Image (spheres, coloured by chain):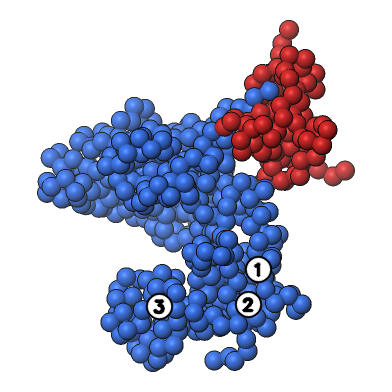
Chain colours: A red, B blue
Amino acid sequence: MPGSASLSAQLIRCHASTVLLRVSGESMQAAGIDHGDLLIVDRGLEPRPGQIVVACLDGCFTLKRLVAHQGRLRLEAAHPAYPPLELDCFDGARIWAVALHVVRTLKAP
Amino acid sequence: MSCEPWSRRRQAIVLIDGNNFYASCEAVLDPAVLGRPLVVLSNNDGCIVSRSAEARALGIRMGQPYFQVRRELERQGVVVRSSNYALYADMSQRLMATLEPWVEALEIYSIDEAFGQLSRPADQRSLHDWGRQLRHHVLCQLGLPVAVGIGPSKVLAKLANRLAKTTARATGVFDLGSMDDPDPHLAAVAIEDVWGIGRQLSRWCRLRGVADAKALRDMPSGELRRRCGVVGLRLQQELRGMACLPLETLPAAKRETCVSRSFSQPITSQSELREAVATYLSRAAEKLRRQQQRAGAITVFVRSNPFNGTSFYSNSATVSLPLASNDTAVLLQAALPLVAVLFSPHKPLHKAGVLLQQLRGEETLQHNLLLPLPLEQQHRRTALMATIDQLNRHYGSGTVQWAAAGMQTPWRMRRSRLSGAATTRLDAIPMVRA
């Protein structure tokens, strides 16, 4: 391959619709996403069940897995302490973006 | 005049612009303000320059001074933001990049509007559906609402864009080119709202009973030509559906570059004025290098507050450079002596600015035998400037600056309600709760 490998070409599908977010909280730990991680999300993709998504709930960005459950959509955490959230229980809730990559800076031991 | 119906014309011009662009940008990355009334203030938090749809619905007017409506905004729970130009510029770039593949040619007309050129498909009478898809696409990709106006010329596209916002059933898209009878729509647009008609010209039109776009289109050409020459004639032809104004897809090389700001508090000492001028000149020089240009002359201007009743003071001074330059140090050396000429101890200054003039391309200098420095040293200066520009772009404006620009700067623009650099700086990115 000519040229040098570009990280942004690897991780960013479309610059215009890509946004970086910083993760706060532990609810997605079992899915490999930790507190403090950098998240690369894309607003231009159609969210599908099974994907990890950013939802707008009560004026906050919330990171969860989108799951179809008994004909309804809900958001599930990857942590036993966090119960699932039914999407239609929230006023004006919507899926804002699909999470595509996690960037984690390794800490010195 | 062509008798062919507009809808059979192959070429269509589209004008796309962001609705309440600044206010919309503020809400894009901040779910806490999405759907809430929000206003954006001008420089120094002066007056309202952009309102979200919700703020509009509350009856908040454009241009209202902030200090007058502050209490009322608080009472109504309106979110107030200072102008965040870094954010708007970034969203603008995203918007233009998103529009590009939808048209055959794109002219970026301003931070929030672009003209596009496209062919009307033979089997489709109206481009309305195309416009709706584009609108939906931009909203999904970026979260920005846009209005889409389509017509056979730029002036008509601009007019259609206006109709897209004001016509109740248009829902953000209006294709004037597909109308069997565009006349009622043209008649609905007041003469003052026609693109290219200034205040004087609209007064002149009204005196002749020409009150709307349709009347302007149909008025005698000779009369219009006598009043405003070929410019007026072109405008009329554009209204008749003949495209006379070409799409400018390459920005014209700039002849001048200006950086000026109002101070948050009046400047009363010469040293403060020096710092302000040095700061603006550094910014202007950075712009110049980005445009790959050099300046042959520098004008510095100052003025007092025209509204506070004391005697108004305004002055400017110009210096010519022996050799055109875009080196900040060279420009500072030439321009800073002007500060002493312009400063007057008993005139508190409200605003200052620098104007870089006689701009020319960077390459012209390389053939000049009168280089101020040996060529190798010249290259080192160029590399230094490039490094400084890069640092300031990445880590925020003013990260690296000339000492002349000052360290404590009480005169600096007031932006008390600035949102974060959500898309341009890594340390300011928004948070997602997990």
- Mark 2 is on which residue type? Ser
User: B287 or A18, which lies in front?
Assistant: A18
- The first of marks 2 and 1 along the sequence is 1
The reply to the same-chain question for discs 2 and 1 is: yes
- Mark 3 is on which residue type? Asp
The reply to the same-chain question for discs 2 and 3 is: yes
Under circle 2, the secondary element is helix
Under circle 3, the secondary element is loop
**For mark 1, what is the residue?**
B128
**For mark 2, what is the residue?**
B178
Residue A5: % across, % down? 80, 38
Residue B391: % across, % down? 55, 34
Question: Chain ID for label 3?
Answer: B
User: A90 or B24, which lies in front?
Assistant: A90
- The first of marks 2 and 3 along the sequence is 2
The CA span between labels 1 and 3 is 24 Å
A109 to A74, vertically: above or below = above
User: The C terminus of chain B appears in which quarter of the rendering?
Assistant: top right
**For mark 3, what is the residue?**
B212
User: A70 or B54, which lies in front?
Assistant: A70
Residue A99 visible in the picture = no
The CA span between labels 2 and 3 is 21 Å
Tell me if label 1 and label 3 are in contact, CB under 8 Å: no
Tell me if label 2 and label 3 are in contact, CB under 8 Å: no
Residue B104: % across, % down? 69, 67
